[in-house]
Amino acid sequence: MASLAPTLTSAQSAPTEVTPLLGTSATKPQAQVREEAVTPFFRQEEQPDDDGEDAPLPIVQIALLCYCRMVEPVAFFSIFPFINKMILETGNIEEADVGFYSGLIESLFSVTQMLLMISWGKAADRFGRKPVLVFSLSGVAVATTLFGFSQTIWQMILFRCIAGVFAGTIVTVRAMISENSTHKTQARAFSLFAFTAYLGTFLGPLLGGLLCNPADQYPYLFGNFQFLRDYPYALPTFATGLFGASAVFLATISKSSGDKASTDPKMSTWELLKAPGVSMVLYLYGHTMLLTFAYTVVLPLFWFTAPELGGFGFSPRQISTFLGLAGVSQALWTLLVFPPLQHRLGTGGVLRLCALVWPIVFAVWPICSILLVNNYMTAFWILVPTNVAVGYGVSMAHTCAQLALNDISPSHYTLGTLNAISLVLISGIRAFSPAVFTSIFAAGIRDQILGGYLVWFVVTILAIVLAVAVFWLPKKAEGKLKHNNSAD
């Protein structure tokens, strides 16, 4: 067997407990060039432990970065509970027009974020992670706070766009988590990263709903504060801004002596896309998220639709219950199952496993509908919660895609830009996929194409395509570690 190329030692590349909190390695990583090839379902070839397999995960650093990660989803989702009422009360518009402006304001955050994502990534690569992190967090905190003081729709649009402009946090945090973990510990690190994103999507609406219009919600506490009557939506946005400010404070006081700007030769976006394996990993990432977005928008519609049309006829309470079960399942799979599974099978093995299961998960839902129509209720109520609890294990594919992206990066200093490109891709898919798949669903129901199950046929075919495409995952992105106890 050919000998492996020399790699960096653990002391050179792996962060330790004394590594500066938001620092980057001062040593330039050695580039590894490997050929792409079709891989078996679970690769037996193992990657050498070139990142210090036994280096412990720096929990303090990762915890801080995950805390910073929550700022963006909290800022994005916190306005959802009150945005419609705020528009109606401050916009001086007809109630029929509220939906248009609500959708516009909610989406502008993501649109401006998408337009500047690559610029934030390049800035993090050029000037260092910490300055970009502190600057972007500060901008989001201020703009989010000001949103609650808006007195016109145009002020709301302006502050929402400003918040999106500064929402480069996720790009920087992704790169920094990669730099503070090794091949052995990055699965655990990114499972925590994913979990805090889920937590942020929960905390944001909770803050918005509990704190909006406090003078009326809690008159015994805030009824005498005229300021809160004049600005009924200032408290939730102030709380969100304070959350962002706390992240700014923690990032600012942290040690940063190792956080240096890149001295590597710069790579343009086009050069990065042409680097070995990068385009394939980006494609797999995009395909994975396409299936995710399709599933997210179609499943509640399917549950709501009447059984005679090809759905379940669930009530809002039932839909809420099963979505809650889905969220718990997703978190448990990501936190508890993914790290040991990735350590055993590697990133590519887990990704191929998820891709194999995905078509089965999609195909089960029409079967459940048929059981319901034919009154096989026992089988129906066993299969539905099982498919929710077990089927959401495919969410591990999201973290696999992120790890593959980290591994395929040409160098340490292109992580920020590469993560930004992936986020732009995901934002673009998120922009059109809901409309496309709900339209397919509606057409199938309206014309009873394939018994009303047209959309499940389409997404199952797309899932099969992914199951085939993952066999072209580049070797460098396999993420299979060499275990210390393996035979020579």
Image (tube, rainbow, N blue to C red):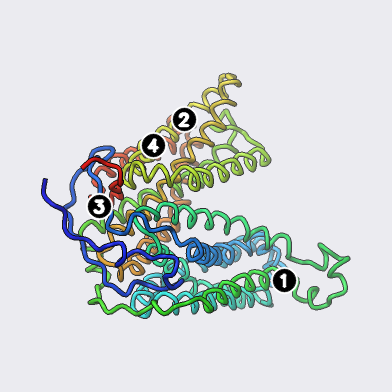
Residue on which the image places disc 4: 460
Q: CA distance from mark 2 to mark 3?
A: 40 Å
Circle nearer the viewer, 2 or 3:
3
Q: Which residue is mark 2?
A: 364
For marks 1 and 3, the one nearer the N-term is 3
Residue of label 1: 235
- Mark 1 or 4: in front is 1
Corner quadrant of residue 151: bottom right
Q: Amino acid at mark 4?
A: Thr
* Gap in angstroms between the C-alphas marked 2 and 1: 45 Å
Residue extending furthest toward the left: 2
Q: Is residue 450 above or below residue 300?
A: above
Q: Nearer the viewer, residue 306 or 296?
A: 296
- Mark 3 burial class by Cα count in 10 Å: few <14, some 14-19, many 20+: some
Q: Secondary structure at mark 3?
A: loop
Q: Quadrant of the C terminus?
A: top left
Q: Nearer the viewer, residue 347 or 78?
A: 347
**Which residue bears the numbered disc 3?**
48
Q: Amino acid at mark 3?
A: Pro
Foreground: disc 1 or disc 3: 3
In the structure shown, which secondary structural element does the residue marked by tag 2 occupy?
helix
Mark nearer the viewer, 3 or 4? 3
N-term mark: 4 or 2: 2
Name the residue rendered at 49%, 71% in the picture: 167
Q: Earlier in the sequence, mark 1 or mark 4?
A: 1
- Regarding residue 112, the answer to whether it shows in the image is no
**What is the C-alpha distance between the residues marked 4 and 2?**
10 Å
Residues at badges 2 and 3 in contact (C-beta under 8 Å)? no
- Real-space CA distance between mark 3 and mark 4, rounded to the nearest whole angstrom: 36 Å
Check if mark 2's residue and mark 1's residue have beta carbons within 8 Å. no
> Mark 2 is on which residue type?
Val
Q: Which quadrant does the N terminus fall into?
A: top left
